[in-house]
Image: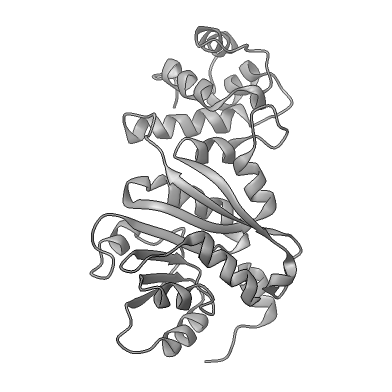
Amino acid sequence: MPRPSRSRRQRLGQHFLTRQSAVDRVVAGIAPLPGERFLEVGPGRGALTFPLLTAGARVLAVELDASLAEQLSRRVAPGSSFALSVGDILKVNLRGLVESPLLAGPGVRVAGNLPYSVASAAVVRLLHEGGLFADWTLMVQREVADRILASEGSRIFGVLTLLCGARATCRRVLDLSPTCFTPPPAVHSTLLHFAPRLSPFPSASDEADFERVVKAAFSARRKMLRNTLAAGLRIEVALADEAARATGINPEDRPERIPLQGYVELTRHLKGHIL
């Protein structure tokens, strides 16, 4: 099967980690141990796959590009603790993969160099399934990492920050320059480590309500919170104002000035008014 063209790689957001010193640093950041089980996202040419296998881990990789998947499968030695699933990480059945014979059991870890075109959505989806995984170590473009790690009050604090923060604690492991990849991306990259946190939501519906509230709040960043909530949730401004004040939030604040816990409490107070 022919190699994917450069234009196809760019469309898929494929930038392969090729500098060996960078590979070594990333693997050290993941810190795989013998017997651990990994769901690897976007294995590409196997830059992380082979070190994980060498460390004694079991790896089930999810690769969107069927051509790359076939090439990688041919390079893995028969009998290795490796399996490969061709599919889109935004659509695959994550529970089904975790419960496969290779990964079955608690404590599955996630690692990968996420395609830049879907990095934000992929992170949110993986973290959403927090009960399935022990942790996540993921490479994303530095701009996305900065948004995930932003503090309230920052101009880049927003929906991605809150959706990730509600599900995990995150730290920056290392940054990599474009020259570590082939083809070199136009941006720097960051390896992030996520550890699951106890969910503040008693049910999946409450978590869905939280996401609606957050997205409504940031639907117009430069407006006051009560106005963005009212418009985004299709509720009266007075109700949005009252809900904010009842939870100790200034309804005239900008959305980025409200911390995670404020949005959690706001969601609880608005329960029953969120469509």
Query: Residue 43, position in %: x, y?
Result: 50, 72
Residue pictured at 33% horizontal, 82% vertical? 80
Give left or right: position of 92 versus 123: left
Viewer-proximal residue, 226 or 263?
263
- Specify the farthest residue to the right: 186
Query: Residue 98, position in %: x, y?
Result: 30, 61
Residue pictured at 50% horizontal, 32% vertical? 212
Give left or right: position of 182 versus 195: right
Quarter in which the C terminus is drawn: top left
Give left or right: position of 212 versus 82: right
Query: Residue 167, position in %: x, y?
Result: 44, 39
Residue pictured at 35% horizontal, 52% vertical? 133
Viewer-proximal residue, 1 or 132?
132
Q: Is 102 above or below relative to 254?
A: below
Residue pictured at 68% horizontal, 13% vertical? 252
Q: Is 61 above or below relative to 146?
A: below
Task: Evaluate whether residue 15 shows in this view.
Answer: no
Query: Residue 34, position in %: x, y?
Result: 34, 69
Q: Is 24 above or below relative to 106?
A: below
Viewer-proximal residue, 175 or 254?
175
